[in-house]
Amino acid sequence: MAWLELSGLISGLLCVWLLIRQNIWTFPIGLFYSVVSVVVFTQERLYADVLLNGYYVVMNGYGWYYWLYGGKQRSPDTLPVSFTPARTRWLLIALVAASTLVMGLFLDNRTDADLPYWDSATTTMSFAAMWMTARKYIDNWIVWLVVDIIATGMYIVKGIDFYAVLYGVYLFMAIAGWRVWKRSMNLASSSA
């Protein structure tokens, strides 16, 4: 199990480092990371995390496609970083809150899940953050920061040490990601 966690740690760090740099290779590395994480979280009975990483597999494919073909010039370099539109942001907040409650209740009452509400919260927030990432919305970094704080504590409690370290490092990477993407937005607006 430790070698799986270690490969998850390495690929997860590489994936986020590439994302901060707005490098398209974040998505194939993210696919590998997601598959490894499905195995780790299945063994630890963190079922919401299993579901989440299955979703990451799909969203890494979507993000890869969107970054390649979603920009006006059909290039990952031309897809601009932007803020999530206000209406979309409020819809995401409502969906995350409702989904966290429903998933938490289900996992608490119908499975042997550990930490069902915390697991559900990080999962539903991550669903939203990953979609925002694929769309190159800068606000994704704020959501990831909250997820990283909760997940680090959750993995420490569960004794999944490599993932606790990974999410602890993600905290700092989320801050760096915000700064780099914000700088990218400022450069784009000043040259427009």
Image (cartoon, grey):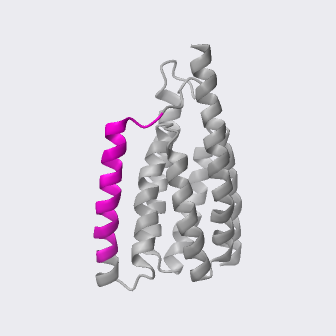
Q: Total of numbered circles in the picture? A: 0
* Spot occupied by residue 182 in the image (x, y as percentages of width and height): 60, 34
Tell me which residue sits at (37%, 43%) in the image: 89
Query: Which is nearer the eye, 96 or 123?
Result: 96
The residue furthest top is 192
Residue 149 makes an appearance in the image: yes
Which secondary structure type mostly characterizes the magenta part of the structure?
A: helix
- The image quadrant that residue 125 belongs to is bottom left
Q: Quadrant of the C terminus?
A: top right
Q: Is residue 81 above or below residue 169?
A: above
Quarter of the image that includes the N terminus:
bottom right
Verify whether residue 84 appears in magenta: yes
Please tell me which residue is depicted at 35% across the width and 49% down the height of the picture. Answer: 92
Depicted 57 relative to depicted 88: above or below: below
Residue for point 42% across, 37% down: 84
- Among the 4 quarters of the image, the one containing residue 7: bottom right
Task: Determine which quarter of the picture holds residue 35.
Answer: bottom right
Is 131 left or right of 105, judged from the image as shown? Answer: right
- In-image side of 137 versus 4 (left or right): left
Q: Which residues are magenta?
A: 83-105
From the top left corner, tell me how far across and down residue 107 is, in percent: 34, 77
Q: Position of residue 73 (x, y in %)?
A: 52, 18
Q: Is residue 73 left or right of residue 86?
A: right
Left or right position of 7 against 185: right
* Image spot of residue 180 (x, y percent): 66, 37
- Can see residue 19? no
In the foreground, 71 or 116: 116
Residue 3 colored in magenta in the image: no
Question: Taking 72 as reference, is 136 above or below it?
Answer: below
